[in-house]
Every structure is written in structure tokens, then in C-alpha cells.
Image (cartoon, rainbow, N blue to C red):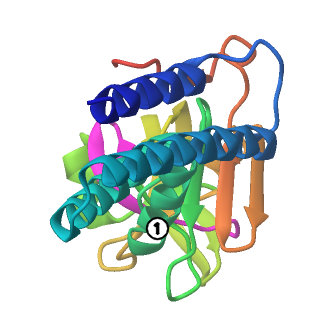
Amino acid sequence: MLFWPVIIIGIAVLALLLSQPSSDAVVIGAQTDMRAVYLAVLIAVLVIAGAGRLLLRGGRNTLVHTAAWLGTIAGLATAFAFRDEAAIVIQDIRGQLMPSVALSRSTGEAELHRAWDGHYRADAEVNGVDLRLMVDTGASMVLIPFEQAAALGINTSTLDYSMPVTTANGSSSVAPIQLSSIRIGQIAVFDIAAAVAQPGRLKTGLLGMSFLDKLTETSFQGDKLILRQSIPGQDDSIRTISSGN
């Protein structure tokens, strides 16, 4: 009769311990160690309770059922205890499967994964329109394919291809424009100098230095590209997207 009350109390105690916020700065490794201790205590309680039930009732069926319940509850407790670490692993897997989707570890930060061909691409929102851009530190500014310019609200009939520009593929002449916004993950940059490529000259838009220079940091960490922007209020041209917008 004491089996289920013990189980319920054990789970409640574990949930209470894991949900308590810490007032001190604690490293992730220490938090993980404490969760492991709490989990070990709960599993010990489950094993003791299960053994007690077996001694009282006995039987092969009871053993199988009790083992199944113990395994299920222990598995759920493990998943709950290490949910933060699991979320990080899931994000990393998502980044590998969909490298152009920006991952956001924190506000004002976006993380891109290198694709199979060695390039970094971002599923961005340009002038409110979804557009995939390839990061090109060799491009002096953001370049938009002519075929996609009209969708961004650009009047292609008035474009003047008089500006020389340098990209990783060489030099060309493009039409200068001004983009109102580019959003990637939790980063938003406004009023960006850009240009439109000549028809048929560019298949994928380039995320050049006119965007990257507005960020606080652009760093490569292994196969990841980390983009960070300044704290809101420090730069009027860079604003963090607030939650819910």
C-alpha cells in the first residue's frame, strides 16, 4: 500500500528540488552534477519501494510490472532532470540538419552552421520578406539578385548599375539601394546599404560587410558562425527584436 505514495512523494520532491532557482551564478557542470545526485536519490527510493512491494506480494508478473513502472518513472525523471542539456543537443542537431536556420542561444545573438559546401547561409527576413542569403565577407555590401528585388519592394525599372563592387567571385557593377531591415534569428539591423545585381548575374543573395559591420561581433567557432549585436540603446541602427514582435 505504501508503494504509490512513496513514488508520488519521491517525484514531488525531485520536481521541487529541480525547480528551485539559484541566487548564485553556478556553472552548468555543477548544476548537472546536482541534478545527477537528486536523480540517483529518487531512483534509490524507487528501487527500495519496488523491492518492498515484491517482498510483500511476490510473483513473476509483479516483478515484470514493477520493473516496467520503475523504468518508465526513472526515464521520465531523467528526461526532466536533464531537459536543459537535451534542449542544447536538439538545437545542435537542428543546426546540422538545417544550417541556414539561425539558432538563438540568447537575445541579440544568432548562430549559423556551415553547410556541406563550406558556405554559411541564413534564412533572413529582408524588408519583411523571407530571403536566403549567403554570408560573404569578401562582399563590400549586401547584394540582392535582380530576380528577387521586386518582391522586396524595389522598383527595378529605375535601377542604375553604375556602382563597382567586389565579391568573392570578382568585380562587377551593381545598382545601389537602401534596405529598410534585415532580420536573422534574434538580430535585426536597419537602414542597410545594399545593391541589386544585374539580371542573371547572381542566384543567391550575399550577406556582405554593410550588414556584418553593424554587428558587435562576427566570429567563427569551428563549423559555427556566431553573430552578435550590441546592447539595445547603444546603437540606434541596431535593435534587438523583442519577444512577441
Q: Nearer the viewer, residue 232 or 1?
A: 1
Q: Residue furthest left?
A: 61
Amino acid type, callout 1? Ile
Region in magenta? 124-138
153 lies left or right of 79: left
Magenta segment, principal secondary structure? strand
Q: Where does label 1 land, which residue?
A: 93
Percent position of residue 140, x then y: 67, 59
Percent position of residue 113, x then y: 56, 68
At x 45%, y 41%, the residue is 80
The N terminus lies in which quarter of the figure?
Answer: top left
Percent position of residue 18, x then y: 57, 27
Compared with residue 141, is residue 24 higher up or lower down, i.e. above or below?
above
Q: Nearer the viewer, residue 21 or 115?
A: 21
How dense is the environment of label 1, judged by Cα within 10 Å: few (below 14), some, or many (20 and up)? few
The C terminus lies in which quarter of the figure?
Answer: top left
Percent position of residue 74, x then y: 42, 51
The answer to whether any part of residue 152 appears in the image is yes
Element at label 1: helix
* 137 part of magenta stretch: yes
When asked about the image quadrant of residue 200, the answer is bottom left
156 lies left or right of 38: left
At x 42%, y 19%, the residue is 243
1 lies left or right of 101: left
Compared with residue 82, is residue 71 higher up or lower down, i.e. above or below?
below
The answer to whether any part of residue 104 appears in the image is no
Q: How many marks?
A: 1
Compared with residue 16, is residue 156 higher up or lower down, i.e. above or below?
below
